[in-house]
Amino acid sequence: MFKKLFGKNKEVNKDSEIFAPLTGEYVKIEDIPDPVFAQKMMGEGFGINPTEGEVVSPIEGKIDNVFPTKHAIGLKADNGLELLVHIGLDTVQLDGEGFEILVESGDTVNVGDPILRFDLNYIKENAKSVISPIIITNSDNTTSVSIADVASVTKGETKIIDVTMN
């Protein structure tokens, strides 16, 4: 009864498309030079070796978490898909230096909306790697994950993953 009152009975689309949040070269998750990501400890996904320092939303949804160190942003789709966009490797140690957050937790975003800018040269010089993992952090709640075979990707345009949630 309450579900009808508050419109919660509408069917949520379980399918999501994940687009490239960065422009650059596609990196298979197994080739990310960090075992936490490469061994899928955090979930299924991919990496991008960026050629520019602007990050856009890879999904339609909400900003779920903006890390205080500005190096990563969590997003959540209406169907429950949770996605982490992590800029570079070991960038948490930069303590926000070189990063500019363009969104706040709770903001609604569409594919292609700018969410973060970073100084690519600064990250290259001061972090372990600029390769940026994009991870489905709740992969255990997916029915299927289909990753496209792509080489170079364009932010907000190149579709990389089709995912179906449980």
Image: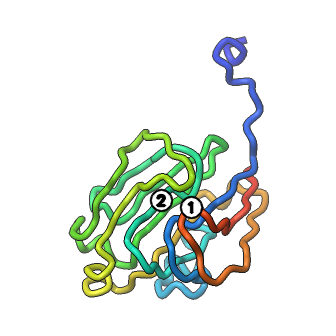
Crowding at dot 2, Cα within 10 Å, few <14 / some 14-19 / many 20+, comes out as: many
Disc 2, disc 1: CB below 8 Å?
yes
Name the residue located 50 percent from the left edge and 51 percent from the top edge: 75
Horizontal side of residue 149 vs 81, given as left or right: right
Could you say which quadrant of the image residue 142 lies in? Answer: bottom right
Name the amino acid, label 1.
Answer: Gly
Q: Decide if residue 62 is on the left or right side of residue 117.
A: right
Say which of 119 and 64 sits in front: 119
Q: Left or right: where does residue 45 sit relative to residue 94? A: right
Name the residue beneath numbered marker 2.
Answer: 56
The residue shown at (28%, 65%) is 99
Q: In what element is the residue under mark 2?
A: strand
Q: Position of residue 159 (x, y in %)?
A: 67, 65
As helix, strand or loop, the secondary structure at mark 1 comes to loop
Residue 102 vs 41, above or below: the answer is above
Give whichever of discs 2 and 1 has the lower sequence position: 2
Q: Quadrant of residue 50?
A: bottom left
Disc 1 designates what residue?
Answer: 156
For marks 2 and 1, give the CA distance. 6 Å
Location of the N terminus by quadrant is: top right
Q: Is residue 99 above or below residue 76?
A: below
Q: In the rendered image of this protein, does residue 81 appear above or below residue 10?
A: below
Residue positioned 61% across, 64% down in the render: 157
The quadrant holding residue 152 is bottom right
* Spot occupied by residue 106 in the image (x, y as percentages of width and height): 43, 39
Mark number, residue 37: none
Horizontal and vertical percent for residue 61?
A: 56, 45
- Three-letter amino acid code of the residue under disc 2: Val
